[in-house]
Amino acid sequence: MGLRTGYKQGIPSWVDLATTDQDAGKSFYGSLFGWEWNDQDMGDGSSYSMGSLKGHAAAGLYTQRDEEKQQGIPPHWTTYITVDNVDEVAGKVAGAGGQVFAEPFDVFESGRMAIVADPTGGVVGLWQARQHIGAEIVNEVGAFVWSELITDDVEKAGKFFGDVLGVNVHSQTDPFPYTMIMVDEKPVGGFMAKSPEMGQMPNVWVNYFSVADCDSTAAKAESLGGKIMVPPMDTPVGRFAGLTDPQGAMFSVIKMNEIMP
């Protein structure tokens, strides 16, 4: 079982969903991935739904803020990257060409976070863990397995994350062009060049969840009210599909050729 007790700086460690219908989101992802839910009172009349798999924290879900809706921001998944000191890392963002959307703030006793964007516009969270390390279970069926930034300038994005996180960034051409964030010489996340077929899609982080059967999971998502945006297809690392949930949030599922440690 892919259980975690902590993460090093530079590793994507948590994902959560901002949605227009919290109950519908819980029903959809619970049915699709087998997550069970625990609603946590946020003290302002709202709740944060913590999804667990086999009793371990797997992902989060909450109602999207009104200001985001008014700005026309659709429901979306957010990737959070662990950092040792969020104030220090966020302080490097502007100088590296990025933008800080939410200055560092405390999330009760769970941790401290900030929301930033790289110079190409991809929005990502920075997470300094306290009581909440992030995902306690990863890299197995029903759990988060990978995050990648789809961007129109991989080189610029890669340099940004190398500068602000102090991680190595490695580009490869075989078996396909891809750039990876490396921590302890292991790939922990990636950057993919946006293709012409993606049209005006913004530069965005996409989260992948591991499944036992890509085709049947995509079909089930559709039967639950989601949409198949990229039909199941084989890649060198596994068979994947690009999906949206019933509220329109984009995510991917993949049947990995090899189980990641």
Image (cartoon, helix red, strand yellow):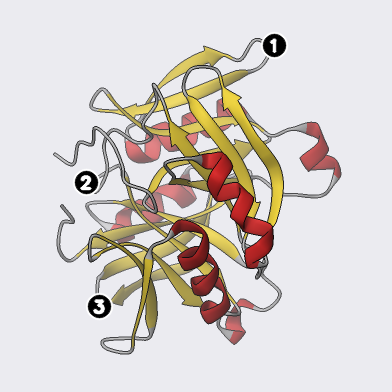
> What's the CA distance linking mark 3 and mark 1?
46 Å
Q: Residue at x 66, y 68 (%)?
A: 119
Say which mark, if any, is on residue 192: none
Which amino acid lies under the numbered mark 3 shown in the image of this protein?
Answer: Pro
In-image side of 22 versus 138 (left or right): right
**75 on left or right of 215:** right
Q: Which corner quadrant of the image does residue 179 belong to?
A: bottom left
Residue type of the residue flagged with mark 2: Glu
Give the residue at mark 1: 45
Q: Is residue 176 above or below residue 239?
A: below
Secondary structure at numbered mark 1? loop
* Marks 3 and 2, how far apart at CA: 18 Å
- Counting from the top left corner in percent of width and height, residue 93 is at 63, 57
Return the residue at label 3.
Answer: 236
The image shows residue 49, relative to residue 76, as above or below, that is: above
Q: Secondary structure at mark 2?
A: loop
List the residue tagged with mark 2: 140
Amino acid at circle 1: Gly
Rendered location of residue 212, percent (x, y): 22, 52
Work out whether mark 3 precedes mark 2 in sequence or the reverse, and give the earlier one. Answer: 2
The residue shown at (66%, 17%) is 46
Are the residues at dot 2 and dot 1 in contact (C-beta closer than 8 Å)?
no
**Percent from the top left, x then y, of residue 225?**
54, 45
- In the image, is residue 1 above or below residue 42? below
> Residue 241, can we see it?
yes
Answer with mark 2 or mark 1, whichever residue precedes in sequence: 1
Front-most of residues 76 and 174: 174
Nearest the viewer among 256 and 81 is 81
- N-terminal of the pair, mark 3 or mark 1, is 1
**Left or right relative to 17: residue 253:** left
Q: Nearer the viewer, residue 252 or 46?
A: 46
Residue drawn at point x = 46 percent, y = 71 percent: 191
